[in-house]
Amino acid sequence: MTAVVGSHDLALITLDTLRYDVAADLAAAGRTPNLARVLPGGVWERRHTPASFTYAAHHAFFAGFLPTPAGSGPHARLFAARFPGSETTADGTWVFDAPDLVAGLADAGYHTLCLGGVGFFNRRSALGSVLPGLFREDHWRPEFGVTEPDSLRHQLDQLQASIGGLAPARPLFTFLNVSALHQPNRHYLPGADADSVDSHAAALSYVDGRLPRLFALLTSRGRPCFVIVCADHGTAYGEDGHQGHRVGHEVVWTVPYAHFTLHPGDW
């Protein structure tokens, strides 16, 4: 990352509540063709999230603690705050002297943009203002939220507008919290009257259909973009009696992860 920060735009895309098993199954079945174009080897990496719900997971992400590879470690991190004794800061880790990655990138000259999704980014309360408050520019509207069936289209409309107002020479860090996977997601499965693993999968298919526009926007400024796509946590649909997340269950702690570089003209 020491060779990437400064020369590339950066993007962190969190697919809120996306389960690893659902993501892997859809990729294997060919139901997410746009993701298949960018996932290394066409498959998701299996990782463990640092937290079981959105607020805590994103605090960890913004401190440089992205989902951890499921295999034995230690695992070098892409980004890390400078602090004594870190065992996961390696030669290629981009180290920042700031309390969070967003501030560190701002100090390095990046414009930092937050496109919120779920309620922890909506600024409708003091709690909902903490995470978006890290960014130089942040946006949330009801049509970005979990009850809007075409939420990602509205988020991408804002991304296009924000990119259009940014000086071309200034690098950009885009954070996008995709809310479509989160309950309620039954509206993505015709005839469904309750949320389920199947409607969760249908929501991922919807998101995949919007990705060409997202990737084209991320590279529309004429520079390569290093992209991280992952879930913040998974969610339960009745497994062992659990519903939702903020519980220590395998379907919550295990998440899909990928990072890759997009180049202008790829999309």
Image (cartoon, rainbow, N blue to C red):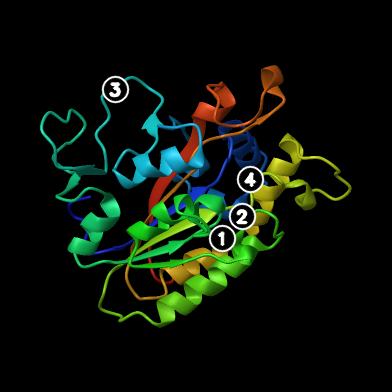
Q: Is residue 95 above or below residue 102?
A: above
Residue 211 is labelled as 1
Give the image location of residue 243, x and y in percent.
Answer: 68, 29
In the rendered image, residue 75, in percent from the top left (x then y), is placed at 27, 29
Camera-side mark, 2 or 4: 4
Q: Earlier in the sequence, mark 2 or mark 4?
A: 4
Which residue is labeled 4 in the image? Answer: 182
Of all residues, the one furthest to the top in this rendering is 240
> Alpha-carbon distance for marks 2 and 3?
31 Å
The residue singled out by tag 3 in the image is 73
Horizontal side, residue 40 vs residue 154: left or right:
left
In 3D space, how far apart are the residues under numbered discs 3 and 4 (Cα atoms)?
A: 31 Å
| Residue 38 in view here | no
Residue found at x 41% / y 58%: 132
User: Which SS class for mark 4?
Assistant: loop
Which type of secondary structure does the marked residue at label 3 adopt? Answer: loop
